[in-house]
Amino acid sequence: MFISYRYPSNSGKVIKSPKPTSDEQIQGSKNAVIQDLERKLRSKSELLHDGQQRLTYEQKMARRLLGVENAASVLELQKMENEQINQQQNTPDSQRWQAYQSPAERQKLSSREVENENALIQEKHYPPRFLQKPDENMLIQQYGLCRIDCKVSGLPPPELMWYLNGRPVQQDLGHKMLVSGKGVHSLIIDAVTESDAGRYECVAINRAGQCRFTVNLEVEVRGPIQAPEFVYKLQNARAVEGGKVKLECLVTGQPQPRIFWRKDHEMIKQDTNRISLYHSNEGKVGLEIFPVDKCDAGWYTVSAQNEAGSTICTARLDVAAWPVKQVPNTKPLKVRPTFTRYSVLNGQGFLPDPASQYAATSYPGLVESDEL
C-alpha cells in the first residue's frame, strides 16, 4: 500500500513512501549476518598461529586410535561422503525447497544436522590394533619374574583376554592382569615354574572387530637350591703396620651366593688402593690388605646370600707397630779365661796345673770380655 503526498507547489512531483519491513525479514537478515560472522570466526579458529590447519576432535581421536596413516585414509573417505551429501543438498530442487523455509525452520534444521553429526561421530567404531607388543619368544629362568606388556587402541575401548595353550589364564596370587594409567596391559607371573611354559595368546575384542598376538614362553629349569654355608670361617688375625694380611673363608651354596664385606658395620668398597676382594669358583672368599695401616684394625664381617638364605661370620684383626731395631756391635770381643783375669787384677792369682781338673779348658762357659 502506497501513500502519496502532493506538495503545495506547482512542481507536480509525487513521492512514494518506502514499504515497511516485516519482522520476519528483519530476523532473516540478522540470522544471515550472524551466520556469516560465525563462518568467518570458524574458518579463522581452524588455523593455528603458524598457519597450519587445526585438528578437530574427531581427527585427534582418529589419530590417537588408528595412527596417522590410517586416520588420514578414514577421514578422506568421510570427506568424500560429506561432499556427496553437499552436492545432493545443492541441487536446484533442494535449493528451491530451502528458499521456501523460514529462518526458524532453517535454525531447527541446522541444530538437527549438528546433532546428527555428533551422533555419527559417537557411532563410529574402530577395530582393535596393537600399538605395542612383546617379542614372539621369551626365555625366563625358573622362579624368576615374567612380564608381558602390550598397548592396544580401538573404539570403543577393547577388552583383553589371555590364553595359555588355548585355555584362559586364571588370575590368582601368582598370575596378575594389570592396566596402567597410560593404557598398557600387563600379564605378570611372580615366580615362573615349568607349568607356566607354553604358548600365550592375547586377544583384544570390541564391536568393530578383534586382533591378537602370541608369545612362546620357555622356562629355564635350575638345579636344586641350597642355602649358603661356611665350610671354614674367618679366623682372628694379627698384622704389623706396613705389612700384608689376608682374611679367608670357604663358602658353599646353590646358586652361588653373593658375598658382602663389612668393617665395623660399614660396607667395604671393591678393589681400593690397599684393599682387594676376591671370590673363586670353588667358593674361596678372601680379603687382602697391603700395606696395613693402624686404621685397619677392627671387626670384619663377611655375609653370603642367595635365594635359599643367608649366613655370616666375623673375625678380629689387630694391628701392631714395628719393633725397635737393635744396632749390632761390630767391634770384636777379646775373650780370656776368668781365673787369668782375676789373677791379673789382685796379683795373687795362681796358675792351675794344666793337668788339673780346674784347668781353663774345663770352664769353656766362663769367659769375660776386655770391655768390662
Image (tube, grey):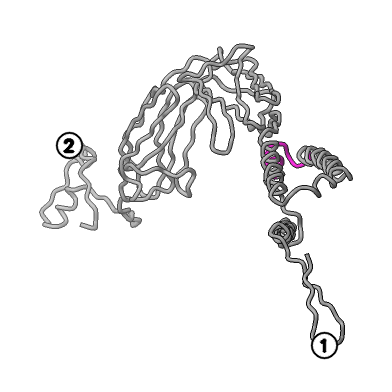
Residue at image coords 66%, 21%? 215
Q: Is-magenta flag for residue 346? A: no
Q: Which amino acid does label 2 sit on?
A: Ser
Residue at image coords 61%, 16%? 163
- On the image, the x and y values in percent for residue 17 come to 77, 72
Q: Quadrant of residue 217?
A: top right
Camera-nearest label, 1 or 2: 1
Query: In the image shown, does 54 or 17 lie closer to the viewer?
Result: 17
C-alpha separation, residue under disc 1 versus residue under disc 2 = 198 Å
- On the image, the x and y values in percent for residue 95 come to 84, 47
Residue at image coords 60%, 21%? 161
Dominant SS of magenta comes to helix
Query: Which numbered marker is on residue 356?
Result: 2
In the rendered image, the vertical position of residue 163 relative to residue 305, given as above or below: above
- Looking at this view, name the residue that lies furthest to the bottom: 9
Q: Is-magenta flag for residue 65? A: yes
Left or right for 236, reference 95: left
User: How many other residues sit within 10 Å of disc 1, few (<14), some (14-19) or many (≥20)?
Assistant: few
In the rendered image, the vertical position of residue 17 relative to residue 129, given as above or below: below
User: How many other residues sit within 10 Å of disc 2, few (<14), some (14-19) or many (≥20)?
Assistant: few
Left or right for 135, reference 186: right
- On the image, the x and y values in percent for residue 104 come to 69, 50
- On the image, the x and y values in percent for residue 352 come to 16, 43
Q: In which quarter of the image is residue 126?
A: top right
In the picture, the quarter occupied by the N terminus is bottom right
Left or right for 284, reference 16: left
In the picture, the quarter occupied by the C terminus is bottom left
Secondary structure under badge 2?
loop
Q: Over which residues does the magenta segment extend?
A: 60-69
Query: In the image shown, does 184 or 174 lie closer to the viewer?
Result: 184
Mark toward the start of the polypeptide (1 vs 2): 1
Q: Name the residue under label 1.
A: 9
